[in-house]
Amino acid sequence: MPIVNVLAADRGDEPLQMDHLRLVTEEPPPLPDAAVCRVGVIGLGYVGLPLVLGYAKASRAIGLDISASKIEELRRGIDFTGEVHGDELKAADALFTTDPRCLAEADVIIVCVPTPVNSHNRPDYGPLLAASRSIGQNLKRGSVVVFESTVDPGTTEERCLPIIEQVSGFKEGIDFYLGYSPERINPADPTRKLADIKKIVAGSTPEVTDFLEALYSRVVKAGLFKAASIRVAEAAKILENTQRDVNIALMNQMMTLFDKMGVRSTDVIAAASSKWNFHHYRPGLVGGHCIAVDPYFLVDAGRRHGLPMELVAAARAVNEQTPLYLVEKLEDLFAARRSGLHGTRVLVLGRSFKEDCPDTRNSKTFPMMDALWNRGAEVFNFDPVAFDDHFEGGRGARNIDDPFAEGPYDAVIITLTHAVFRQQFDAATLINLAPKHAPLIDMRGSFESPEVKDWFRYWRP
Ligand SMILES: NC(=O)c1ccc[n+]([C@@H]2O[C@H](COP(=O)([O-])OP(=O)(O)OC[C@H]3O[C@@H](n4cnc5c(N)ncnc54)[C@H](O)[C@@H]3O)[C@@H](O)[C@H]2O)c1
């Protein structure tokens, strides 16, 4: 049965004229052929770039980004995230562009733009809404629009869809289709790439969900999970990340309490892990733009629904405080020093937000280094893995290339253990960095040995 509908195209402030109205008497267009349809991806970062390359295998894919320098790098076969190989990038049948008009060529448009928070930890939907406008301006009838960015439930249908409809003059379910499929990739983990992780898909109708299952099976080999609705899929992703944040916060708080009691939390966790239903989490600095950000979207959603998300907010606060605890710990280890950290030279090994990952965005090493600097320490930072174009914050820290050339230091803090640190440092080399009885904080406990404990005032969680 043909659908009769009157649609008004968005003309900004122009008064509505009769020729702006469109009478739709056609059948809704069929969904594209999932096996060969052309995919366009908006946002070519950690999430979007592997998708473009995956979809480029069956038909030419389109990769759109607002960053001209990123597009230039990708065209030259360079991916600073380290997630894809240069050869793969150069060989891919993909168009890398900053021109949103190219989206008009796509049968499916997948949105992978950032979903950050602002300086007040409130959600910043700006990139998502800008991408929705680009889609609206260039959407062709019969396309499928899929959001992958992590959001609070309702965002896709209540914030993004209205913009696409208003700008395009099209109607979802009549002219185009909508879906959501959260990404679960684990940057810097070679065993969990896009193809290896089961993916959730949800469409606006069961038919769209089936289409997404077929579409994503082109790039995901670990299987698909069909969620009950777009909102369920949105909620599932944000729950996964919030669960992790809350559990790490518990470990961080336990670390602080047990430490005051003279008990090592990692010893406690090892003992508790002998029980079958104990969940293994360890203390650490929770940074980056996923685990340390997504729970704030839930806190904000709770505020809008009149439900204070106290547990989630408290966990965030604990994890935000953890870098400062390490600074206080260092002061403790310097207890005999009457001037505290003032005038000390502190070497910090590690800057990126997680092991073996170049990404330093929202790394909690920065507030830690700021706090050291505020207390009068001279801070030296060494991280050969970190990608320096993203060096943000750490006002007082000097980024150094050779930690041995700048030494000796009064104290060393190892925030995380990159594989390259294991090759570069051992008891013998660490001892060269600082005089006997200098404090050494080893957040991952990777360098504990009788020699290290004999030389340093050694602490691990
Ligand atoms: N990185 C991860 O491990 C990971 C995992 C799962 C989910 N996510 C989620 O996926 C989304 C993307 O994350 P990411 O890590 O790939 O981000 P990213 O910052 O690495 O990449 C995003 C890209 O989008 C581009 N961009 C921003 N606004 C744009 C616009 N309006 N039009 C076109 N391009 C635009 C940026 O220039 C950037 O290149 C976020 O919502 C994130 O929470 C990330």
Image: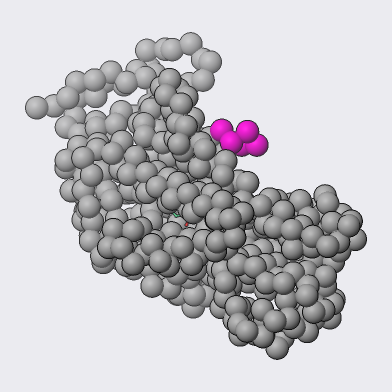
Q: Is residue 338 left or right of residue 166?
A: right
Front-most of residues 297 and 147 = 297
Q: Is residue 371 left or right of residue 304?
A: right
Q: Please tell me whether residue 116 is drawn above or below residue 270 in the rendered image.
A: above
Question: Could you tell me how many numbered marks the image carries?
Answer: 0
Percent across and percent down for residue 58 are 30, 66
Write down the region rendered in magenta.
118-122
Q: Residue furthest left?
A: 1
Percent across and percent down for residue 125 are 52, 35
Please tell me which residue is depicted at 48% across the width and 11% down the height of the picture.
15
Residue 171 sits in which quadrant?
top left
Percent across and percent down for residue 214 are 21, 56
**Is residue 34 at all visible to an observer of this figure?**
no
Residue 142 sits in which quadrant?
top left
**Is residue 242 at all visible to an observer of this figure?**
yes
Q: Residue furthest bottom?
A: 428
Percent across and percent down for residue 344 are 86, 63
Q: From the image, which quarter does the N terminus lie in? A: top left
Front-most of residues 136 and 50 = 50
Front-most of residues 50 and 340 = 340
Is residue 45 shown in magenta?
no
Please tell me which residue is depicted at 32% across the width and 21% down the height of the picture.
7
Please tell me which residue is depicted at 50% across the width and 42% down the height of the picture.
315
Q: From the image, which quarter does the C terminus lie in? A: bottom right
Front-most of residues 1 and 452 = 452
- Main secondary structure of the magenta stretch: loop
The figure's colour scheme reads one colour
Q: Please tell me whether residue 252 is drawn above or below residue 274 in the rendered image.
A: above
Q: Please tell me whether residue 299 is drawn above or below residue 409 in the rendered image.
A: above
Q: Is residue 390 left or right of residue 135?
A: right
Q: Please tell me whether residue 115 is drawn above or below residue 355 in the rendered image.
A: above
